[in-house]
Image (tube, grey):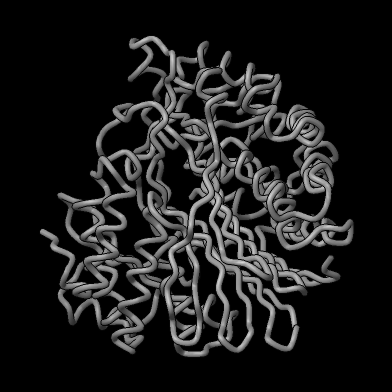
Amino acid sequence: MPSHVAVAATGPVAVDAGLTAVRAGGNAVDAAIAAMCVAMTTEPGVVSPMGGAFVTIWPVDGEPETIDGNVEMPGRGAPSERFGQGLREIHLSYGGGITIFGGYGSAALPGALSALQLAHDRHGSGAWAQAIEPARLAAADGFRLGSAAASYLALTTDNLFGWDPETNATLTREDGSHLQAGDRIVDADLATSWGRIAEHGAQDVYTGEIAQRIARACADGGGLITEADLAAYRPVVRTPLRQQLGDWDIATNPPPSVGGPMLAVMLSEMARRGSYAWADTIDVQRRVLTYRSEVHDFSADLEEDGYTMLEEVRRSGLKGLNTSQSTAHVSAVDSDGLACAITASSGYSSGATVPDTGLLLNNCLGEPELNRLGLHVLAPGTRLASNMAPSVARHRGGDVLAIGSPGADRITTALMQVLTRHCLLGMPLGEAIAAPRVHVRVVKGEPLRVEYERDRAIAEVIARQGLRGNEHEPQAMFFGGVGGAARSATGVLFAAGDPRREAATGVA
């Protein structure tokens, strides 16, 4: 049993939950689960228990694995007339303006809690109930709203979180005005749900009382999730992608995820070029993300297309590619060298709270970037695309790293830049995370645009290459929130968080 752990999470309450889990007999996996469940409680609107998650773990004496708890297309046993219904078109100003769909019809089948339970069963050392208890306490006793969640709610309370009376009551003040950073939120219904999950396990969400309530609410609200969907859901243990980056061996999320393969290809090309000039960073992103926009965004088989892309790059490099917010991440490493990275997403949120549970449903069926083939067109049971790429790594000298980021399609580009700086250039982890970022925005049928944090060198490269640029403030939330936890070869534990997302770190 480890005696110490380093945790990078979404806020101090989540970090404290991870440290407490280890003091109670847990390891890095218990710490990451406890921190993520607290994040699902204390980051309302940003992430919830009713989304998807991936857990990447590198055991002390074993090979790494990824547990796929991503969301699925629901609708088993649902009448045909329910498909295409229950959707609310909503325009958000977030990220320069996007149009999404909320409502019960935007909710995909959630898998996050099943993945956390399986990770605990396979690798945890403490009690499941102890990992869940901090989340229950946070909901029952109340928590202070952080600035990241408050800034998102400020953009969404009147539309996305305004149509459902139960959601609106939870996410506004008593007089109906917007919540502000520092406001205290108590959610007794969510606390009760966490209590049931602690006592009965995550299975209560899939075959127990909570499952019945989810299915009933979706039927009443025009959604697609049925009791048959919930009972059929299974997390999948997958072999991660492995990418050598200098002296580091990195394991990340494999297909059918899109995020992990894109990250692996970007890293392999940066290592091949041996350069971290902004021109190379932008060019690699442009090539890889253009391929994604033309192939993966419209793929009918993400697993096959993902491995095909990796093989094409292995044979021919990037010339082999024939081209024409709402996430949370936790990283933990313990003193034994066990590494765990968890990324979870609820999309932008559906705005729908399952009555009397405090559980806010995801809107992954309503995210255009995850549903390029169209709304409600996938067969029930199909895993959706995902940008999530929780990663773990080992250095040939003995260092251990767990790392990941929220940020939708900016996840891969954020991690590409941080890992290149840290693993190839030797930049300290905190500096690598804090440095300026770029993201090449590629959507088929739209002009390519380079999003970037204010930096003269970046702006000059964009102008020199004749590209369209969109400048953001330094360390903007738009560019993700990378969090890393590590252990040095000599046994020193440390963690680094991202100033873009009010991240917190702790070592105990």
- Residue drawn at x 73%, y 63% as measured from the top left: 28
Is there any visible trace of residue 92 in the rendered image?
Answer: yes
Q: Which quadrant is the N terminus positioned in?
A: bottom right
Q: Is residue 96 left or right of residue 114?
A: left
- The answer to whether residue 473 shows anywhere in this view is no
The answer to whether residue 331 is left or right of residue 107 is right
In the depicted structure, whether residue 115 falls above or below residue 422: above
Looking at the picture, how far across and down is residue 176, in whole percent? 65, 29
Q: Residue 35, percent across and down?
A: 72, 54
Q: Nearer the viewer, residue 137 or 112?
A: 112
Is the residue 269 above or below the residue 42 in the image? below
Q: Residue furthest left?
A: 324
Please provide percent x and percent y for residue 229. 50, 23
Q: Quadrant of residue 264?
A: bottom left
Residue 291 place in picture, x, y as percent: 21, 59
Which residue is found at the position 28% from the left and 67% from the top? 450
Q: Is residue 493 placed above or below 252 in the rendered structure? A: below
Identify the image quadrant of residue 73. Answer: top left
Residue furthest toward the right? 24
